[in-house]
Amino acid sequence: MSHRPEVKAFFDEPTNTASYVVWDPATKAAAVIDSVLDFDVAAGRTSFASADAIIAFVAAEGLKCEWVLETHVHADHLSAAPYVQERLGGKLGIGANIIVVQDTFGKIFNAGTEFERDGSQFDRLFRDGDEFAIGSLPVMVLHTPGHTPACMTYVIGDAAFVGDTLFMPDYGTARADFPGGSARELYRSIRKVLALPPETRLFMCHDYKAPGRDAYAWETTVAEERARNVHVHDGIGEDEFVAMREARDRTLSMPRLIVPSIQVNMRAGRMPPAEDNGTVYLKMPINRL
């Protein structure tokens, strides 16, 4: 591939999330992918150290932020996208099936008629096969549902940002048991990603350190995933994968931050409207998740 972006990862250990700044070395045009808003769930307090580190890096490198991208509506951390966009500029983008997620979780959280379920909180809704650019870098968007209906993979030059679809080869694949998820769709999405050229760099959204590995890791390649992914390496068929994934998902607890994360992230990283006392509240649905 002739286009090779520069990539800087920022790993948030409390949520095991990798955020990225990716940029075109020729033009200094950049995108921020899957930023994290720090959230103390016990105190209900937000802070911005993780996002500020990204903002400081962009400024120090003299980059121009053209895009603030989300791979999906995250269930394990709150997005800092509006905060990043306010300070760096750029358009906020996510997959067009955000409207499916908004409809599903708008009902679960009884969000009310004031909550728009049309994706209008974002500047751009991407569909499978859409193309755009970051400076001179070509970007192709792949719809890769299964973990959620709105999951997207951004192929930027020789690098692909896969969200929660894949993990490092020794850890496997994402869960598919959230509302709207599908293990069968996940398998097909993964095969779509793994059909990219073998040398394509793959950047994960999370790492949890597989047993026997001491260091966090978030970058691999298509070739490595096809050869060594413990859940979905070449030779694993769809039915075999679905049986494994569904059995494994039945053993998993809900993510620690799913309740606040979904309410905020379905609003493009914004909090619900303040109530008449000026305070913002997040709801806790009982026996729904």
Image (tube, helix red, strand yellow):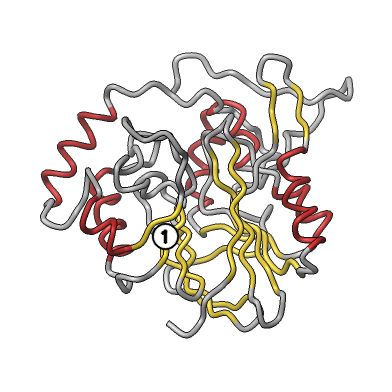
Q: In the picture, residue 201 is in which quadrant?
A: bottom left
The x and y percentages for residue 128 are 42, 68
Q: Residue at x 49, y 76 (%)?
A: 157
Residue shown at 70% from the left, 74% from the top:
29
Location of residue 65 in the rendering, given as x and y in whole percent from the top left corner: 74, 66
Q: Is residue 259 left or right of residue 149?
A: right
Looking at the image, residue 69 lies above or below residue 76:
below
Tag 1 secondary structure: strand
Location of mark 1 (residue): 202
Which residue is depicted at the point 84% across and 55% down?
A: 87
> Where does the N terminus fall, quadrant-wise?
bottom left
Foreground of the two, 170 or 289: 170
Work out whether 270 lies above or below 188.
above
Q: Is residue 274 left or right of residue 22?
A: right
In the rendered image, residue 60, in percent from the top left (x then y), is placed at 81, 61
Q: List x then y, in percent, for residue 190.
A: 30, 56
Q: At label 1, which amino acid type do we have?
A: Leu
Quarter the C terminus occupies: top left
Determine whether 236 is above or below 172 in the image: below
Closest to the observer, 1 or 276: 1
- Total number of numbered discs in the rendering: 1
The part of the image, by quadrant, that contains residue 11 is top right
Q: In the figure, is residue 70 to the left or right of 171?
A: right
Q: Residue at x 71, y 64 (%)?
A: 91
- Density class for disc 1 (Cα within 10 Å; few <14, some 14-19, many ≥20) is many
